[in-house]
Structure formats: structure tokens, C-alpha cells
Image: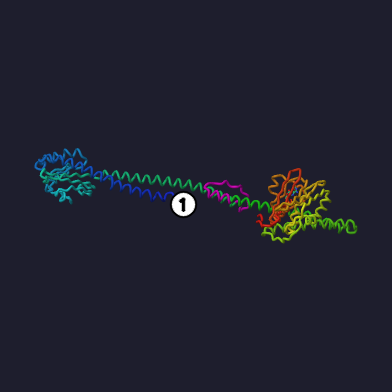
Amino acid sequence: MFRTLRSRLILSHILPLLVVVPLIGIALIYLLEEAVLLPNLTAELKQQAALIVDLAETQPNLWTDAAAAQAFVERTGTRVTARVMLLDRTGNLRASSDAADANRVGQLLDHPDLKRVLSGETVTRQDYSRRLQADVADVLLPVMKSDEQLSGVVRLSYRLTSVYEQFTALRWLVVGVLIVGLLLGAGVGWILALNLQRPIEQLTHAVDHLAGDQSSAPLPEPQPEEFALLVRAFNSLAERLHSLEDARHQLLANMVHELGRPLGALQSGVEALRGGADEDPALRHELLIGVDAEIHRLRRLLDDLSRHYDQALGPLELNRRPIELNEWLTLVLAPWRESAERKNLQWMMTRSNEPIVIEVDPDRLAQAVGNLISNAIKYTPAGGTVSIEIESEPAAALIHMTDTGPGISPEDQAHIFEPFYRGHTARRFPQGMGLGLTIARDLVVAHGGRLEVTSTVGQGSRFTIWLPRTFSPQPSPA
Ligand code: ADP
């Protein structure tokens, strides 16, 4: 019972009507009956009775001549809608405009207020008349002689049946209004429920889809605002799940590729040595250098992965100590300089004019710089240039690393710091897990600095590490 949103909404729309409309109807009918119609009717009857009394006062023979009295009530009875009676001063009926009263003429009127009217009071009352078998509005007015003596009484009785018939019509009108109101309320509740139900169903469907590992397009934001917020939250959750799923796929693909290639090279090297290459010292030396290089590559790969994993676990702990940036960087970059020159790249290094002493974790910063320089060397074709420039600012130290490689398109620039993302040009190059820049940025940010890129496709790229001279910890990026 009322388990669905629809039934509850319909109920909430018709319940107030069910209570309010009958209450208003009862109050309205009561007010009309007691405060307006009946008092008006009585007042009108009194007016008519007063006119008849005025007339009767001018005809004293009414109280002596029965025929004159009967003629009088019949004449006046045709003018008013009520029954007209004349009573003598002892309360006996003298004449009535209703022919059914003929047998009561001469008898004492059976009326609870007879005494009061005979003592000269005006009486009005509403009561059930057994004789007329209806509710009746009664007005009794004394007729006085000029010497203030009572000559008789005029009585006007009006059946209230026709008034009550009007109330019955009013009651039906209230019932009609109630039915129309209920239908309208139910209709509005139904439409509202449909409007609310649709986005809920869509959302449930989309959540089922997502739980079933199927991708779902972003849902349109419905009204009202609360639903829009819910759908917005769902869309961003779905987007996050998709990008995590993409990253997982990308990681697997990259790992298979990155582990497979050096393993293949190692296997070929070992097979060549087994097949007799170890007997030729020059060939053995060359093969061992190759094997060593592949083992180094695998080590770097593992380092990158474990760094990424560490970063996912929480903020980095830095072992800071002061270094002089120019000296330190020249030392750190020495092996990279060699590998750049082996690839036939021009190497340029510009130190800052003054020494820069900053407190950093040298191992972590070396990893960040190494990742950037290894990219510069990797992506710059032979004959190109890799240049490093150290710049000093009052509040910061800057390390610019510029290459004349293929450059990075603006679309790629928006994503290259995301884990496992590889740019379009980079896909032509055999190596890369798409983790180097993510790790470099995280390490720089852990130092309170930032990593920025500017690049033009076809001309080259420039990565800048910005490090504050005084350290203030910053939250690591998600
Ligand atoms: P990867 O292992 O692919 O080099 P990175 O995280 O180091 O991963 O770099 C992400 C992407 O950024 C690369 O795939 C490449 O498209 C782009 N990129 C990084 N450095 C350079 C560079 N010096 N020149 C051109 N593209 C670069």
C-alpha cells in the first residue's frame, strides 16, 4: 500500500482535498443556513406579518365576523408565500388561508409560545410541525386595539422544505467540487510522479549499466534542482570510473609492451651467449652491455611503477637538505649529457649568475629532473638540441628544460600529466609508460613547487620546474 512514489504523490495531492473540501462545504452550508438564509427569511416573514397586522388593525370586524376573517386570510394568503392564520385574543383559531385547517377553526391553537404572544409579545421560531410534516418558520404578531388591548393574533407559517431543497443542491455542488478536485489532484499527482519517476528510472538504469561494466553516456540533467545535483554527481562518478578503467587498460597495455620488449632483448642476448657468442670477447662484451642496459630499463620501469604506487598511498615524505642548485644539477645531469651526446644531440647548459641554495630532497628532485630530461632526449631526433637553463628569482628557483623535439599538441598538453597517458606523437616512439610526467609533477608539487609546459608542434617543448626558495607544504594532487 502506497509503496510507490506515484501512489504517495497522488495521495499527498488528494488527501488535503478529502479533508478540506468537505469541511469547507459543511461550514459553508451551516453559515448560509444559520447566519444568512433563515434569519433573512424570518425577517421577511416578520415584515409581511407586520403589514398584515396593520391591515387587520383597520378592520375590527375580523374578530367578530368569521366570514370576514376567512375572506381576509384568503385575500392576504394569495399575496404572501406563507400560510396566514388569525387567532382571537384567547388563542382560538379564527381563520386560516390553508383549507386543510378548516376543521381546526374555533379550537385553541396548540403552540408552545401562545401565552407569550397573547401577552402582547412578538414570537418567531423554527420548528418541526407534525401537522405540516415539515420544518416550519413561524411568526406570531399580536394585533392591538387603539386602547392597547389585544384584539387577536396574526400567524404566518412558512414551510422550510424549499429552502432545504436549495441546501441539498448546494451539498451536491460540494460533492461535485470534491470529485472534480480529487480527479484533478490525482491527475496532477500522476503527472508529477511521472516527471519524477522518469529521471529516477534513467538513473537506476544507468547505475545498473555501470555496475554491469558497460559504459553509459552522461545523463541529461533533469528538473528539479535536487535531481540535477544527483545526476551531476552520478555523471562525475561515472566519468571518474571510466577514466580509472581507461587508465587500468592503458597500464596493462603499456606494461605488456614495456616488459615484453626488454625481456625479448634479454632473451635474445642470453640465447646468443649460449649459442657460442661468449667465446668471442668483443661480442660478449657488447651483448653484456646490451643486457645491462635492458636491466636498467626494467629497473627504471619498476621504479616508476613503485613511485606511482607510493604516491597513490599518500603524501611523500621528503628528506630535505640544502644544495647549491647549479653544482648539484651539473652532477645529476652528467649521465644524461652522455646519453644525449651518444644520440648525437647538442647539449647546452646555462647556469644562473649567482649561486642558488635551496632545501630539497635531492633524490626525489633528481628523479623529477631525470624524467623530464629523459623525455627530452627520447623525443628529440638526432641532430636536435637539449638545453637546460637555471634561473634565479627572488622567491624561486627555476629549471627550464628545452628541446627541439616534435612538440606537444594543445590537446595532448591537457592530458600529459595524467597517469598512463601517452601523447599522439609519442606513440611513434617505442618506449614509455605514460608515468614519467605524472611522477615528475607529483615530486615537484611535494616540494611546494609546480611543473609547467609550453610547446609548439614541430618546434619543440619547454618544461619548467618552479621551486620556492622557502618551503611551504602544498596538498599533493589527486
Ligand atoms: P612517456 O612514458 O610516454 O614518455 P610521460 O609521462 O613521460 O610518458 O609523458 C607523457 C607524454 O607527454 C608522452 O607520451 C609524450 O606524448 C609527451 N611528452 C613528454 N615529454 C615530451 C617531450 N619532451 N617532447 C614531446 N612530447 C613529450
The image's colour scheme reads rainbow
Q: Is residue 450 left or right of residue 73?
A: right
Q: Is residue 351 left or right of residue 207?
A: right
Q: Is residue 230 above or below residue 77?
A: below
Quick check: is 409 in the magenta stretch? no
In front of the other: 332 or 294: 332
Q: Quadrant of the image for the C terminus?
A: bottom right
Q: Is residue 376 left or right of residue 73?
A: right
Q: Is residue 110 in view?
A: no
In front of the other: 23 or 184: 23
In front of the other: 222 or 304: 304
- What is the span of residues highlighted in magenta in the rendered image? 209-233
Residue 418 percent across, percent down from the top left: 69, 51
Name the amino acid type tagged 1: Arg
Q: In this figure, what is the number of numbered marks? A: 1
- Residue on which the image places disc 1: 8
Going by the picture, which residue comes out furthest to the left? Answer: 64
Q: Which residue is located at x 82 percent, y 46 percent? A: 383
Determine crowd level at label 1: few under 14, some 14-19, many 20+ residues with C-alpha closer than 10 A.
some
Residue 371 percent across, percent down from the top left: 75, 53
Quick check: is 213 in the magenta stretch? yes
